[in-house]
Image (cartoon, grey):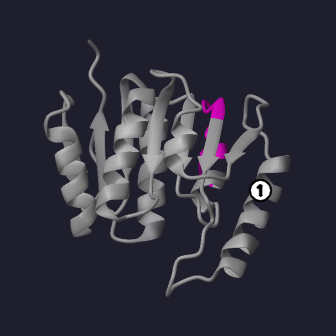
Amino acid sequence: MPIVKPASAIQYRQTIVDMVRAERARVVVEVGVYSGILSMMLAEIEHVKSLTIIDTWAEWPGKFDQAHMDALALDVIAWAATAKLKGGSAVKVIRQESIPAAATFDDDSINFWETDGDHAYEAVKAETAAGLPKVKPGGLMAGDNYEAPTVKRAVDESFESNNVVSLEANGRVWWIRKPVW
């Protein structure tokens, strides 16, 4: 899959949208929603029949206070309450940590799992471990900030011994295709 190296958040979001389109993914999960820009872009894709967005909208110490994050959450939740996917389904919002949220999905049920949540090493390891079983064989898991040392290390370690067909990265974006057994 030819991917242009994204250098900005705008390019990252467009790369994910292009990947979802190319894969014709019908069931999509987005972890780490923040302002919902990517969510809104994903909701516009014709063949996406199920979109679940997951975020705690918790304070980022030293960056964003809880009042700011709550305001973002309210805006995204209000949008999701009225948004309809092309097939008529609603956008589902889960406001909680990604690990317990992942447990709400059946194994092998997601075509495309995108993550841009907590970038701490332990969090990335835990999230990829929780999310990968939920991805269908042949489906993709992708994420942002591969250039960040904690993300790169966690992603590399998570998939080096996990029988993943391939781990690919292009600047910010990393992705794997779950094996078809």
Q: Which residue is mark 1?
A: 77
Q: Is residue 27 above or below residue 43?
A: above
User: If the image is split into quadrants, where does the C terminus sit?
Assistant: top left
Residue 57 in the image, given as x and y percentages of width and height: 63, 65
Residue that lies at the very extreme toward the top in this rendered image: 181
* Label 1 CA crowd tier, 10 Å (few <14, some 14–19, many 20+): some
Name which residue type carries label 1.
Answer: Ile
Give the secondary structure at mark 1.
helix
Q: Residue at x 62, y 47 (%)?
A: 53
Classified by dominant secondary structure, the portion drawn in magenta counts as loop
176 magenta-colored? no
Image quadrant where residue 78 sits? bottom right
Boundaries of the magenta span: 41-50
Q: Is residue 169 above or below residue 148?
A: above
Q: Residue at x 37, y 56 (%)?
A: 123
Image quadrant where residue 75 sits? bottom right
